[in-house]
Each structure stands twice: as structure tokens, then as C-alpha cells.
Amino acid sequence: MATERTLILVKPDGVARGLVGEVISRIERKGFRLEALELRSLEREVAEQHYGEHTDKPFFADLVEFITSGPLVAMCVAGDDVIVGMRNLMGATNPVDAVPGSIRGDLATVIGENIVHGSDGLDSASRELELFFPGRF
Ligand code: IDP
Ligand code: MG
């Protein structure tokens, strides 16, 4: 068991649908802690850096377009094994495969609008937290 931090986003679809409270509530009920929270829009450059690993994917342009399409909520979430814990709370990337009980399994239907982002490892967590909350963690 390790205490970790991760970057969680409620993406523009989640904000537009009024699901910020729902997502935060699930995070808090699980026992994870909010250490930073901000409602903001993403500049294209930040979005492209955030999703840098997907630059060559066919869906990259749509992904950047979508994540910059409206306000999102960025959070630093901390807790025991929070990186994998949040990935489990979120559910599979494609809501079709996400189990009921998970955020994507309960609340989303299509892969392009799957409500939440969560860092997928220690390295991406520190890189993404630095991108969204420079110098704070
Ligand atoms: P993750 O969000 O579960 O970590 P990634 O593979 O890192 O999933 O992909 C980032 C985001 O890009 C996904 O959350 C999803 O919104 C979108 N995405 C991933 N794969 C596809 C795809 O095949 N078509 C369209 N969008 C995709
Ligand atoms: Mg990912």
C-alpha cells in the first residue's frame, strides 16, 4: 500500500451534464482526499500536452477538440493506492465495457464522452499534476 496522488478530470461532458457533484461524491465516499480542485477551460496547447501519448492515434484531433470544448474540473486526489483505485472507480475506457457500479459503467454510453480522466501510473500522475497544478505537488 502506498499513499499516492493522481490527476482526475471531470471532462466537459460531465460538467455539462451536471455530474461534478456525483463524481466528487463517489471519490469522497471511497475515502480519497481532494487536495486541489479547479473549474477551468483548457487551452489547445495544454490539451495536446496532456494527451501527448495519443498524438499519433486517429482519434487525437477529436479528443483535443472535445476536451477543449467547455469547462472541465481538474482535481488532485490523494489516498492509498489512489491511482489504481480511481481507475477502478472510473471503469473501463469504453463505457460499453465498464462494469455497473463504476462511473463510466453507470453514467456514460460512448467512448468519446466518458466523463472522467484519471492518470494511469505514477509517472503520468506526476507529469499531469505538474501540467495542471504547476509547482504544487
Ligand atoms: P483512459 O481515459 O481510460 O486512460 P486512454 O486510452 O488514455 O483512456 O484514452 C484517452 C481518452 O481518449 C479516452 O478516455 C477516450 O475518451 C478517448 N479514446 C480512447 N480510445 C478511443 C477510441 O478508440 N476512439 C475514440 N476515442 C477514444
Ligand atoms: Mg489514459
Image (spheres, rainbow, N blue to C red):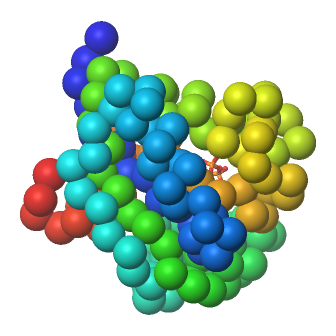
Query: Hey, which quadrant is residue 98 in on the image?
Result: top right
Q: Quadrant of the N terminus?
A: top left
94 displayed left or right of 9? right
Q: Position of residue 103 (x, y in %)?
A: 66, 42
Identify which residue is drawn at 45% across, 84% down. Answer: 41
Q: Is residue 107 above or below residue 2?
A: below
For the question of whether residue 123 can be seen, the reply is no
Where residue 25 sits in the image (x, y, percent)? 47, 43
Which residue is situated farthest in the top direction here? 1
* Picture residue at 44% right of the left edge, 27% below the top: 30
Q: Is residue 31 visible?
A: yes
Q: Nearer the viewer, residue 62 or 109?
A: 109
Viewer-proximal residue, 76 or 121? 76
Position of 55 with respect to 85 (left or right) is: right
Question: In the image, residue 4 lies at what x, y percent?
Answer: 27, 31
Q: Is residue 43 above or below residue 126?
A: below
Query: Horizontal placement of 59 versus 81: left or right?
Result: right
The answer to which quarter of the image holds residue 106 is top right
In percent of the image, x 28 and y 38: which residue is there? Answer: 33
Q: Is residue 119 left or right of residue 60?
A: left
Q: Quadrant of ligand 1?
A: bottom right
Residue drawn at point x = 53 percent, y = 49 percent: 23
Q: Kindly give the residue lying farthest to the left in the view shown.
A: 135
22 over 56 or under it: above or below: above
Total numbered badges shown on the rendered structure: 0
